[in-house]
Image (spheres, helix red, strand yellow):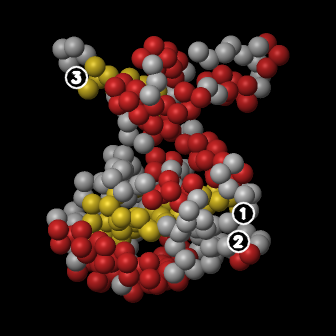
Amino acid sequence: MARAVPDRDAVCAVAQAAAVIGDWWSLLLVRETARGRHRFDELQRELDISRKVLTERLGHLVDSGVLEKVPYQQGPVRYEYRLTDAGRALLPVLVAMQDWADRWVLGDGRLTALADEDGAEAHRVHDLPGARLPAPLPLPAHTGGELDPVDPDAAATVLFCYPATGRPSPLPEGWNDIPGTLGCTLENRLFRDAYASFTAAGIAVRGVSAQRSDEQRAFAAAEDIPFPLLSDADNRLSAPLRLPTFRTGQMLRLKRLVLVVDRDRTVRHVQYPVTDIPAAVDTALRQARALAESA
């Protein structure tokens, strides 16, 4: 169970946070509920945790306001465990921990927007096919309001994640020296130019970055982008899918990758790392079109 905070650390926010989520199992429970696993049995199965420990940790996270119990069955009453607003506010913490470990534990310490194709980070992304995006998953859209990454009316949705465009805000110093950062404007333009081919096949397109919606709006207006650009500044998408990131300019940026998702929210195809942007756009169209034709 969580340790009590000693009096000497009563006003230390780090100590208080550690008392709530500093336990191994508590962190993993936040991770799994973010990924869409909400019921006791599926949490136990996924984490291979004893029922006693799971009961204790879930009770602690509910008492701490990180999770809430939501009934999904009557007679007998059974509950799901859902992230509260406080729990969702922990998603950037999980992504920051993942980013640190990808670079300093699983990687060689280099700052890069790419990945070793045989490395742990790439293997994690390549395991995404078969995973389902949590629902609902509203993200701020440059068109106003919030929009789900998956278009329910499309036979397939292509999500292309990219680090950042240099318009309207200047990119951080040293941006061009980070492998894999260049090409975001080109990528958006290529998807724009191929957009008619995607829509003709019943395929939706979404661009995703960690930039703010107002920045995306200015870029979309300048480049005449016809599809929604979604902001993942709060890690609502990157946390549940454990998408790769890199830190520069005092914020986490998404690494470049492409997902093809079916209308049931299941990831069917992944491209990562993306080193040939024109080829990635062509592959996304081919893969999504094949998925749409088989639907």
Residue 286 shown left or right of residue 127 in the figure: left
Q: In the rendered image, which quarter contains the C terminus?
A: bottom left
Q: Of label 2 and label 1, which has the lower sequence position?
A: 1
Of the pair 82 and 129, the residue shown nearer to us:
129
Q: Are marks 2 and 1 in contact (CB under 8 Å)?
A: yes
Whether residue 96 is visible: no
Disc 3 residue crowd, few under 14, some 14–19, many 20+, Cα 10 Å: few
Where is residue 218 shown, x and y percent of the image? 54, 74
Which residue in the protein does label 3 denote? Answer: 73
Residue 128 shown left or right of residue 216 in the figure: left
Which residue in the protein does label 1 denote? Answer: 111
Disc 2 residue crowd, few under 14, some 14–19, many 20+, Cα 10 Å: some
Q: Is residue 221 above or below residue 148?
A: below
Q: Is residue 279 above or below residue 85?
A: below
Q: Nearer the viewer, mark 1 or mark 3?
A: 1
Residue 227 shown left or right of residue 185 in the figure: left
Q: Residue furthest bottom?
A: 193
Q: In the rendered image, which quarter contains the N terminus?
A: top right
Of the pair 213 and 191, the residue shown nearer to us:
191
Q: Of label 2 and label 3, which has the lower sequence position?
A: 3
Q: Amino acid at mark 3?
A: Gln
Q: CA distance from mark 1 to mark 3?
A: 48 Å
